[in-house]
Amino acid sequence: MGQEAENAHGGQGAPDALPRHVAIIMDGNGRWAKARGLPRTAGHKAGMEAVRRTVRAADELGIEFLTIYSFSSENWSRPKAEISYLFSLLRHFVHHDVARMHQMGVRIRIIGERKGLEPDIVRLLEDCEELTRDNSGLTLIVAFNYGGRQEIAAAARKLAAAVAVGRMKPEEITPEAICAHLYAPDVPDPDLFIRTSDEKRLSNFLLWQAAYAELVFVPGFWPDFDAAALRAAVQEYARRERRFGGLKAEPAGQAEPARQAEPSGRTTRSKLAGRA
Ligand code: FPP
């Protein structure tokens, strides 16, 4: 996105910069529960409350896109009972939260691999995307059965297939072409990437899209995350200077004229408008 991000934020490193897109790894549900002598599922249930608080807070702050990591491709290795609880939380979310979010004008999108999910879950996900499709408020992107490597591999397979039938030339496989085949190519890259519970890893989340995201690691567990924690992360983001591989922005008139570089790979929304 590059140029688009600068326009949206009023310049690189602007002190009052509001991230357009915030992505969150909601970590620490299990440890939150353990610290209270509760089962891990209680941590996930409390984590759901934190999701509700965070969606409201993000909407109030004027953030345009919020992506949350709800179930990773690797979470299948957890005990069956925990997996089925996480799926029941997703069902609960669709049945009980989506209508409220729809009233708030939230648009809901789901990214991740649908193959391997129960058909009723896939239908529910499609229904809530359909219901909220025309909303113009916050876009909440739920990453479910999501893996960053899997997403990139899926894009590579589609491009390879296009080359195999002669619809594309190998040299046309550019970062932009890869981007256009990701799950949500019209969504701008995350500006702010938050992970709770003080773990400092990306854990296969938005690997391509986070190329220039500002990483903020929050010490508390996810179920304790709230509006104040989101604001603090946004303030930390606003203190960062984003250079996208370029140089520190000079005050107007002092910088030498230079070609504006755009971080390779992200296709802007305007370029992709109307694509699936
Ligand atoms: C990581 O904590 C959290 C998860 C794997 C699941 C996150 C899910 C929710 C917060 C529920 C929201 C769901 C929807 C459908 C919106 P962990 O269990 O790995 O914690 P630990 O590292 O302390 O064990």
Image (cartoon, rainbow, N blue to C red):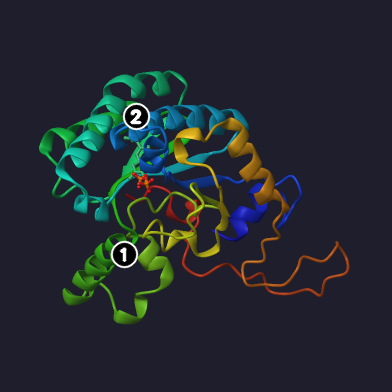
Name the element at disc 1: helix
Would residue 123 be found to the left or right of residue 233 on screen? left
Question: Does residue 137 show up?
Answer: no
Q: Quadrant of residue 49?
A: top left
Report the disc number at residue 45. 2
At label 2, counting other C-alpha atoms closer than 10 Å, the crowd grade (few under 14, some 14-19, many 20 or more) is: some
Q: Is residue 88 above or below residue 151?
A: above
Q: Quadrant of residue 61?
A: top right
Q: Pick whichever, 38 or 74, lies toward us.
A: 38
Residue that label 1 marks: 149
- The amino acid marked with disc number 1 is Arg
Q: Position of residue 124 (x, y in %)?
A: 21, 31
> Disc 2 or 1, which lies upstream in sequence?
2
- Where is ligand 1, by quadrant? top left
At label 1, counting other C-alpha atoms closer than 10 Å, the crowd grade (few under 14, some 14-19, many 20 or more) is: some
Label 2 vs label 1: CA separation? 28 Å
In which quadrant of the rendered image does the N terminus lie?
bottom right
Q: Residue at x 43, y 54 (%)?
A: 272
